[in-house]
Image (cartoon, helix red, strand yellow):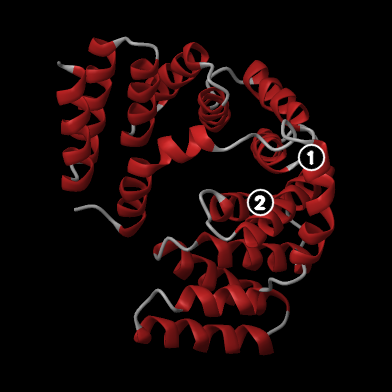
Amino acid sequence: MLNTKQIVVVVVVIVLIGSLLAQPIKGLVDKQEQNTTAAADESASSMFTLKSVSELAKQGINNSLAQEITAIEQQAEKAEGEDKISLLQTLADKWDDLAKPIPQGFIYKEMAEINPKLEYWVKSGDAFREGYTNLQDTAMASALNKMAIDSYEKALAMDSNNLAAKTGLGAALVTGSSNPMAGIALLREVVQADPKNLDANKTLGLFSMQSGQFDKAIERFKTVVEIKADAESYFYLAAAYEKIGQKSEAIAAYKKSKEIAADPTLSQYIDRQIEELSK
């Protein structure tokens, strides 16, 4: 049986390809547009707090779970030191089980501010980055992107060679800064140091697809599925093959995605794609 996080991935991946290819990489769009929105983006980042995003996230869960989380939050507000860290970790785990990354980002940020650990800053950045990916609320997405960048930069200030922080910062810079090439450079540094780095290869693959470099995307996703085969990566690999007209390779990759996911919704979509490719 698929867990909550797997179900979210299956549902999102079906619509992601179209939206991915439709999104311009920030920094490659008109500079005047960036300047116009910069002030709004800056003010937006102060609009969101752990309390506000937690209340928003609770709207999507059942009442008993929401009450349980609220009770832990109240305990955490009164606690100090390691007791507070322990309660915040419990909260982060609760939100992780529910596939709600945005509150996790704020929680790990607070943990890092209490007890500055590289691990907390990286987890904060990762949660913020996961949270803003495919988020429809552009103001919140922009704010979370800035918070992700800040968290990763704080992690790298503690260890400038940390590959997880470099990968996260590279991805966040490409998707949300005015200098995407700086992000690409960081990701290439990671792959040069660790050619089998899963996250960096996957992120570079996604950016290759977004910029229409499907040959490069194929090489990245072939590396990804060699390291760790998953339905999402095979789906992207299939879509990239499809874009350059390699139908038999696309069909094979779609079938692998369907086999691994074992989800009726994704299977129906893939069956339609295979039917079209087989004509």
Residue kind at label 2, given as amino acid type: Gly
Query: In this orientation, which residue lies closer to the viewer: 178 or 224?
Result: 178
* Residue located at (26% from left, 31% from top): 257
Q: What label does residue 159 carry, if any? A: 1
Query: In this orientation, which residue lies closer to the viewer: 113 or 235?
Result: 235
* Residue located at (57% from left, 17% from top): 195
Residue kind at label 1, given as amino acid type: Asp
Q: Image quarter for residue 225?
A: top left
Q: What label does residue 239 carry, if any? A: none
x and y, in percent, of residue 132 in the image = 58, 53
Which residue is tagged 2?
125
Query: In this orientation, which residue lies closer to the viewer: 242 or 184?
Result: 242
Q: Is residue 77 left or right of residue 211?
A: right
Mark 2 → mark 1, Cα distance in angstroms: 15 Å
x and y, in percent, of residue 101 in the image = 52, 60
Mark 1 residue crowding within 10 angstroms, few (<14) / some (14–19) / many (20+): few
Mark 2 residue crowding within 10 angstroms, few (<14) / some (14–19) / many (20+): many
Circle 1: element type: loop
Visible in this render: residue 158? no
